[in-house]
């Protein structure tokens, strides 16, 4: 018998409704995320989107789904070419630098790896094949300069995602830039014929010399790795129009099939209550925060702790509070490692059942993270009370730890740090020797061992509840 899965719900931008999640193939999920455009370091607003994707992915995995996630890397478009030109460097050198930084920041923020990170420049043939189909079917046309455009008036459902009405179209209006005004639909570019601004960035192909438009990159790469119809497409709300709308138009016009079943969009990030901008001096990249020695787990926490469909207001006070929240969870786990009390029994079991149910119900309701976190912190407080009363056994401590770690499979804020606290044999032996020394009241010896452990990065504290260990954070 297949283990039955609990139902859960996502808000689908396409229908503007919460819908029960049903994948195309039982037990599997295909998901696509518009990845970074690598012309600069990603700012924290970009990373909010990538952390939302990560939370979503982890939640699907928590529920036993095998996830195939694809995140593209846009390494050729208007922005990257402009950046390379400004610096007088080859496009590849610029993009390589920011691709490396991007992966380093994902690692620091404990983001699980996607299965595929396709680069746009490695998929030019797939894009050309798609453009050719669109031309054959009458959706694509060539302009005077040799560029190829998508005719939006030919695609019946244009505007369905963003709810932009095609009636507002200016007939024949065309845009050659990758990003354009949100108010009106226009024919958008699939293939840009080479002009001198592109310098040495072009491909000589059967549809002419030039380069792809940004939108076609995502259609070609998502369908290559996930099929013509796949489960989930996510991204920031700012990409809904024109980018995602155009992805739908290109893909569905070419295949005649529905492109994506669930569209999920995260809201913007504000900094100190205002829109982030370099001009206002409130623009931060992850790199900036790391340079200020902000704790990466706290950055992660602050970026996931607000529901993804609400604007998150990033502040340094908030970051501090996030650091405290993460520390509370870590300290709780440390404490559980050393409990030696009597049996709490059903009282603890009841608390564990309640928190699990609350966590799963909240996350199952369109990833309601704030309610899920509140349930966890209530649980931590209540179990701490039991530990204060010295009625949690070592065995019970382990069960609670396992439950916390299962939540952290979704949250990703403590896991590895705590797992790293599985001490090397040498350290364990030193701790035992130190305990022996203390029993014999050999205080000097005990202090020497404490110092030895400290040199290994392990901090020993004696508390009324017993021994507590902290590992110096490596991040
Ligand atoms: Zn995209």
Image: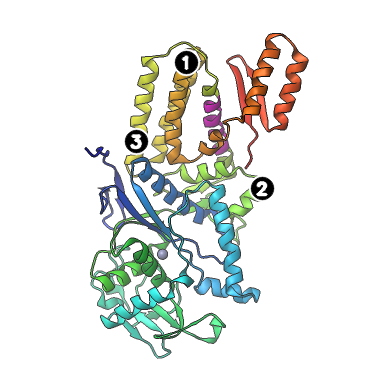
Q: Is residue 418 visible?
A: yes
Q: Earlier in the sequence, mark 2 or mark 3?
A: 2
Q: Position of residue 194 (x, y in %)?
A: 49, 85
**Does the CB distance between marks 2 and 3 fall below 8 Å?**
no
Q: Which residue does the image show at 39% across and 14% down from the upper left?
A: 345
Instruction: Say which element carries label 3.
Output: helix
Name the residue that disc number 2 marks.
292
* Front disc: 3 or 1: 1
Residue 91 sits in quarter: bottom right
- Residue stretch rendered in magenta on the structure: 322-334
Q: Is residue 236 visible?
A: no
Q: Nearer the viewer, residue 207 or 177?
A: 207
Residue 162 sits in quarter: bottom left
Task: List the single residue furthest toward the right.
Answer: 444
Classify residue 299 as left or right of residue 226.
Answer: right
Q: Nearer the viewer, residue 143 or 459?
A: 459
Instruction: State the mark number for residue 393.
Output: 1
* Front disc: 2 or 1: 1
Q: Which residue does the image show at 51% across and 39% down from the upper left?
A: 413
Q: Main secondary structure of the magenta part?
A: helix
Q: Which residue does the image show at 44% across and 54% down from the upper left?
A: 114
Q: Per the image, is 328 magenta? A: yes
Instruction: Say which element carries label 1.
Output: loop
Q: Earlier in the sequence, mark 3 or mark 1?
A: 3
Q: Residues within 10 Å of mark 1 (few under 14, many from 20)?
A: some
C-alpha distance separating marks 3 and 1: 26 Å
* Front disc: 2 or 3: 3
Ligand 1 image position (quadrant): bottom left
Q: Residues within 10 Å of mark 3 (few under 14, many from 20)?
A: some
Please count the marks in the image. Answer: 3
Name the residue that disc number 3 marks.
360
């Amino acid at each position: 018998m297949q283990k039955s899965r609990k139902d859960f719900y996502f808000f689908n931008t396409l229908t503007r409704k919460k819908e029960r999640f049903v994948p195309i193939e039982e037990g599997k999920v295909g998901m696509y995320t518009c990845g970074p455009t690598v012309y600069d370091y990603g700012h924290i607003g970009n990373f909010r989107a990538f952390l939302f994707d990560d939370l979503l992915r982890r939640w699907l995995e928590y529920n036993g789904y095998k996830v195939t996630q694809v995140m593209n890397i846009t390494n050729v478009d208007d922005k990257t070419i402009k950046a390379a030109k400004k610096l007088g460097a080859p496009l590849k050198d610029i993009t390589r630098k920011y691709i490396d930084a991007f992966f380093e920041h994902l690692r620091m923020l404990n983001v699980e790896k996607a299965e595929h990170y396709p680069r746009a420049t490695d998929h030019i043939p797939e894009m050309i094949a798609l453009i050719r189909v669109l031309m054959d079917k009458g959706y694509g046309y060539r302009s005077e300069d040799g560029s190829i455009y998508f005719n939006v008036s030919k695609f019946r459902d244009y505007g369905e995602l963003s709810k932009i009405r095609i009636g507002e179209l200016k007939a024949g209006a065309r845009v050659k830039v990758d990003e354009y005004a949100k108010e009106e639909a226009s024919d958008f570019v699939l293939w840009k014929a080479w002009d001198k601004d592109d310098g040495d960035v072009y491909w000589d192909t059967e549809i002419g010399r030039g380069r792809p438009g940004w939108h076609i990159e995502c259609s070609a790469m998502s369908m290559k790795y996930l099929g013509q119809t796949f489960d989930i497409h996510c991204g920031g709300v700012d990409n809904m129009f024109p980018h995602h709308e155009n992805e739908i138009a290109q893909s569905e016009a070419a295949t005649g099939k529905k492109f994506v079943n669930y569209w999920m969009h995260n809201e913007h990030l504000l900094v100190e209550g205002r829109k982030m901008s370099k001009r206002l001096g409130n623009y931060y990249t992850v790199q900036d925060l790391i340079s200020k020695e902000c704790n990466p787990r706290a950055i992660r926490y602050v970026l996931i702790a607000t529901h993804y469909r609400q604007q998150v207001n990033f502040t340094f006070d908030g970051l501090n509070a996030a650091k405290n929240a993460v520390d509370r969870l870590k300290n709780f786990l440390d404490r559980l490692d050393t409990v030696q009390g009597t049996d709490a029994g059903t009282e603890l079991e009841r608390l564990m059942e309640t928190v699990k149910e609350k966590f799963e119900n909240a996350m199952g309701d369109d990833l309601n993270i704030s309610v899920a976190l509140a349930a966890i912190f209530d649980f931590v407080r209540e179990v701490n009370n039991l530990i204060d009363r010295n009625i949690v056994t070592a065995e019970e401590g382990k069960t609670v730890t396992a439950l916390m770690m299962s939540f952290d499979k979704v949250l990703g804020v403590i896991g590895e740090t705590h797992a790293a606290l599985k001490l090397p044999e040498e350290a364990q032996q030193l701790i035992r020797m130190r305990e022996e020394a203390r029993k014999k009241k050999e205080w000097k010896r005990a202090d020497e061992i404490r110092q030895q452990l400290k040199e290994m990065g392990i901090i020993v504290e004696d508390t009324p509840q017993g021994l507590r260990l902290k590992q110096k954070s490596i991040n």
